[in-house]
Amino acid sequence: MSTIDNLPPLRDVIATHELAAKKSLGQNFLLDLNLTAKIARLAGDLSGADVLEIGPGPGGLTRGLLAEGARRVLAIEKDPRCMPALAEIADAYPGQLKTINGDALDVNPLEHLTAPIKIAANLPYNVGTELLVRWLTPPDWPPFWESLTLMFQREVAQRIVAEPGSKAYGRLALLAQWRTDPRIVLELPPEAFSPPPKVNSAVVHLTALSAPRFPADPGILNKVVAAAFNQRRKMLRSALKSVSPEIEDHLNAAGIKPTERAEQVGLEAFCALARSLETATP
Ligand code: SAM
């Protein structure tokens, strides 16, 4: 029996269901249930909330979320081998865990969830970043979720919370900081996982703001930021030439020197630039 519930320890679950980790699915499992319960607590008060978990694997974080009082968990897992292990957790928490065997990039979770909704995941790097960008860029705000609690490579976590002037500062920082309050809440060494990955990891907690920090059209802001950081070493007047033929006027109107580079410009100024471009859009 484990420390947080009446289910077997994760090492036994993995052995019983023959869940040898697959590199192709980015499988680095957390086996310490005290640690997964701690990550679940970092997601905030779960009582009365539905939690969307992506990539539950053998269910370490799933069990943490349920033990910490989540009202219901919807877990989407690509690897069919994990489904019997997840079914055992569903039996131990009747009516509280629904699992879907599928690719999180293709499944619409909304039909299975009721607000308030929190998202928690320990995902492979590429899928995690793609989902994060999707969750941060809906046309309307606030989004369907209240908070995201996500494990990333430490380097990606640092990009999410980066400040202007730093090497890590870029599109991810601006997208995250425009509409959420992102914080690194836990750092984990490779040994926390089985098998251990090559890099350090970190959990980022992002709370959705009720409104974006500064007004801007999401489509225009996204386009400007993507173009600016695509050529981050160039001066903005040339990096953003493709965005508008009058880009120098718009940069000046936003209080940005046309000779500045993207990494020197803060969120407020990028939003001012998006607003100036919007007024010029026919
Ligand atoms: N949450 C578990 C834990 O913390 O031990 C497993 C974490 S492991 C890093 C990532 C999990 O995501 C694996 O179980 C993997 O099969 C699953 N996964 C990978 N790509 C996925 C996708 N596109 N959709 C859903 N699950 C995916």
Image: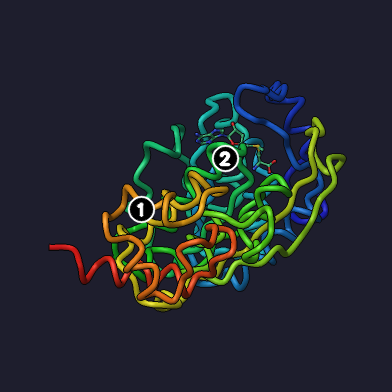
Residue 179 in sight in this render:
no
Q: Quadrant of ligand 1?
A: top right
Residue located at (46% from left, 71% from top) = 256
Image coordinates for residue 127, horizontal then vertical, percent: 53, 38
Some atom of ligand 1 lies within 8 Å of the CB belonging to the residue at label 2: yes
Q: Are marks 1 and 2 in contact (CB under 8 Å)?
A: no
Is 208 on the left-hand or right-hand side of 139?
A: right
Image coordinates for residue 174, horizontal then vertical, percent: 51, 62
| Pick the front one: 93 or 244 | 244
Q: Crowding near pointer 1: few (<14 within 10 Å), some, many (20+)?
A: few
Q: Residue furthest left?
A: 282
Q: Crowding near pointer 2: few (<14 within 10 Å), some, many (20+)?
A: many
Position of the C terminus, as image quadrant, is bottom left
Res 223 label:
1
Mark 1 or 2: in front is 1
Is 268 rendered above or below residue 238? below
Q: Amino acid at mark 1?
A: Lys
Image coordinates for residue 132, horizontal then vertical, percent: 50, 51
Image coordinates for residue 192, horizontal then vertical, percent: 83, 44
Toward which corner of the image does residue 117 lie, by quadrant? bottom left
Residue 53 in sight in this render:
yes
Q: Which residue is mark 2?
A: 55
Is 232 on the left-hand or right-hand side of 29?
A: left
Q: Amino acid at mark 2?
A: Gly
